[in-house]
Amino acid sequence: MRNFRRFTCALIAAIATALPLSAQERDWPSRPVTVVYPWAPGATDASVRFIAKALSERFGQPFIVEIRSGAGGNVALAQVAKAAPDGYTIVYTAIGPAVLNKLMYKSIPYDHDKDFDPIILLSDTPQAIISSPKLPIKTLAELVAYGKENPGKLTIGHPGAGTMGHLTAVLFLARTGIDGSPIAYRGTTPLVTDLLGGQIVAGSPAYTPAVESTTVLAVTSERRASFLPHVPTAREAGFDVIAGSWTAIVGPAGLPRSIVLKLNAAIDEYLKSEEGSRLFAQIGMRVLGGPPERVTQAVREDRLKWEPVIRAADIKLD
């Protein structure tokens, strides 16, 4: 009986695979596709525009970037979760909406695991640990020494509560045993301004060209960034601080597999092209790509990593 059931399941799966695609799937895309971007314009929106341009050229239909900012990405993802799973509305997501928001907000209006189908993992970006060129701190070891010699005086700016920069600051202080203070800003620009002005000692933003006016002490990736080959990782400097943000494209749950695979193949090809790698590197991003399942894997791994950090620091957002 058990073997018969296995045979039946295998037969059903084979028949389903062999069924012809619907006309809608065959003709996709036959009209413009909306790519929702869940934050205000900034450094990373350039990456979604690179992708949209490449897809427009590949499929001969406009891929239109639509900004829907609010609540750390929650507004946009909640709306896309309710969209028809026909391939005409997809959304740019990241570690925040996919992993961190669920761990920090009291409630969020979507379930990233159930409400979305993964399409492709786009890129990752390391956090940078930075200091002011005016300070006599030129290495991560010197920053740690300053923190230990001056208890309570090491201030680390980050781009906002609940961001990966915030978590990086918390992790850095915990792993080094320093008595210091994370300081929240509204983005990287005011953080850098205060750092250069001497109001804070250090910062932990995601790497962008905006931090090039500072002293970049380390990056928090597992390997050195190709666009910052001279900057050591925190681990190379002797401190086990690994942190970074990643981005991805997902669609509403129920998206036909044929459309998922069309999008995945087109975006993956672009990411691995010389142009894609170069343009992403210019804005501080390392291209990733690969099959849709890499998104699911990234969500699972980062949830396990960051949940205890967030709980220990008692980080809560309204």
Image (cartoon, rainbow, N blue to C red):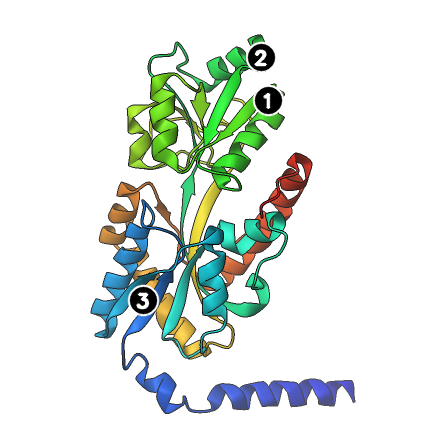
Name the residue that disc number 3 marks: 266
Kindly indicate whether the residue at mark 1 contacts the one at mark 2 (C-beta within 8 angstroms): yes
Q: Nearer the viewer, mark 3 or mark 1?
A: 1
Toward which corner of the image does residue 52 lie, by quadrant?
bottom left
Characterize the local packing of mark 2: few (<14), some (14-19) or many (20 or more) Cα atoms within 10 angstroms: some
Task: Give the residue type that dot 3 points to.
Answer: Ala
Residue drawn at point x = 33 percent, y = 26 percent: 193
Characterize the local packing of mark 1: few (<14), some (14-19) or many (20 or more) Cα atoms within 10 angstroms: some
As drawn, the label of residue 195 is none
Toward which corner of the image does residue 26 lie, by quadrant?
bottom left
Q: Quadrant of the N terminus?
A: bottom right
As drawn, the label of residue 176 is 1
Residue 148 seen anywhere in this rendered image of the structure = yes
- 3D distance between C-alphas at marks 2 and 1: 9 Å
Residue 242 seen anywhere in this rendered image of the structure = no
* Front residue of 212 and 27: 212
Residue drawn at point x = 63 percent, y = 52 percent: 106
- 3D distance between C-alphas at marks 3 and 1: 43 Å
**Which element type, helix, strand or loop, lies under badge 1?**
helix
**Which element type, helix, strand or loop, lies under badge 3?**
helix
* Front residue of 204 and 288: 204
Name the residue that disc number 2 marks: 148
Characterize the local packing of mark 3: few (<14), some (14-19) or many (20 or more) Cα atoms within 10 angstroms: some
Q: Is residue 115 left or right of residue 59?
A: right
Q: Is residue 119 left or right of residue 300?
A: left
Residue drawn at point x = 50 percent, y = 85 percent: 17
